[in-house]
Image (cartoon, rainbow, N blue to C red):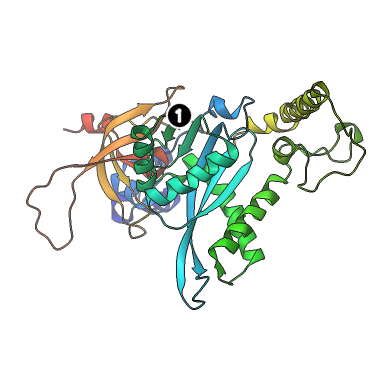
Amino acid sequence: MHRQFHSGVENTLAKIQSKFWVPRVRNMIKSVKFKCVTCRKLTKEIAGQVMGQLPLERLKPSPPFAYSALDLYGPFFIGDTVKGRTKGKAYGVIFNCLSTCAVHLDLIEGYSAKDFLDGLRRFVSLRGCPKEIYSDRGTQLTAAEKELRNATEIFKIKWIFNASADAPWQNGVSESFIKSVKRSLTIAIGDNILTFSKLQTTLYEIANLLNERPIGIKPGCDPELGRYLCPNDLLLGRTQNAVLKGEFERFPSHESRLKFHEGITDTFWRKWMRDFFPTMLIRQKWHVEKRNLQVGDLVLFQDSNVVRGNWKLAEVLLADKGKDKKVRNVTLRYKPIKSGITYKGERDVIVKRSAHRIVVILPIEERLDLP
């Protein structure tokens, strides 16, 4: 009865009871539907896994941009400074500090590794050389990492890429900032086309606005908690970029200047521990532990750059366990089959994907039970 329509439990139950009365039939129907491969293909329930722990770099005080994540976004249409009717393209690059949530925005002329390296050099000149950089596996980013590794001894940067391709949530901090940047650009310039320098100036101003935003728990109306915490408190020593008015020492000593700067840093990290650190411990989603993907599972996986709804059948080749023994990234192999072309035998394609892009069709336990 289930194989006729592959319908739900209640629908199958009603059709069975019209002819037969079977004790405890509901549990039997659930068991049949749970093991039905066709239903798994139709429902496409993502395997998934419980959200992992945050890296240690986000949970401890560190200098601004010492641990940074980056991403590229765009393109943006820009106008030529000489020929007003000539249009070109530019791309935005974002660097965000993983501990202080500070943001640095810049504009690069192209999407190549060379153009990105120019933006990275400007970032290092202004913000200092980061200790670690986190990013996705973009082709221009992997090429830039190789060039930095082989070029000079100036940039001692440890580059950490996402474990899987096509998994933007693994760099979700940068993705959320890009959303805020695009919203601010829409409000500021709308559909207007700016020159390269004017658009770059606009991005700098948006970065300052993002660095003025409150982070962590808002103090509210409690006067004892003081003002809200923002990244500019550490970058500039004040919330806004405007110069403070007040009486200052005309000839301060080196000792008083040192105490002043140390006081700014100590105040920021005390507020950071009080207002921001507790919010980092909350898991926003993926709270339920799921079955670990295992080697030999037959799965479906989908890439975001193909036709929507087009899933590929693959086999789990390797299952990478994290520190908590949970599998969130797997290596898959599948046969490339092109429509309209007779299959003549092809090499397996090896890809690495996140568990949140995978649907389990036939687990290895059920494959071993088959005759």
Q: What's the amino acid at mark 1?
A: Lys
Q: Residue at x 25, y 42 (%)?
A: 314
Circle 1 residue:
156
Q: Quadrant of the C terminus?
A: top left
The residue furthest front is: 251
Q: Is residue 186 left or right of residue 124?
A: right
Helix, strand, or loop for circle 1? Answer: loop
Image-quadrant location for residue 254: top right
Q: Residue at x 56, y 31 (%)?
A: 66
Q: How many numbered dots are placed on residues in this image? A: 1
Q: Quadrant of residue 251?
A: top right
Q: Is residue 80 left or right of residue 366?
A: right
Question: 60 or 336, which is in the foreground?
Answer: 60
Farthest residue, direction left = 344
Q: Position of residue 82 (x, y in %)?
A: 51, 73
Along the line of sight, the residue nearer the viewer: 338 or 149: 149
> Residue 190 placed where, x, y %?
61, 69
Left or right: 261 with respect to 93? right
Does residue 68 appear to the left or right of 229 in the view shown? left
Question: In this rendering, does residue 173 appear at all?
Answer: no
Residue under the point 88% across and 34% down: 250
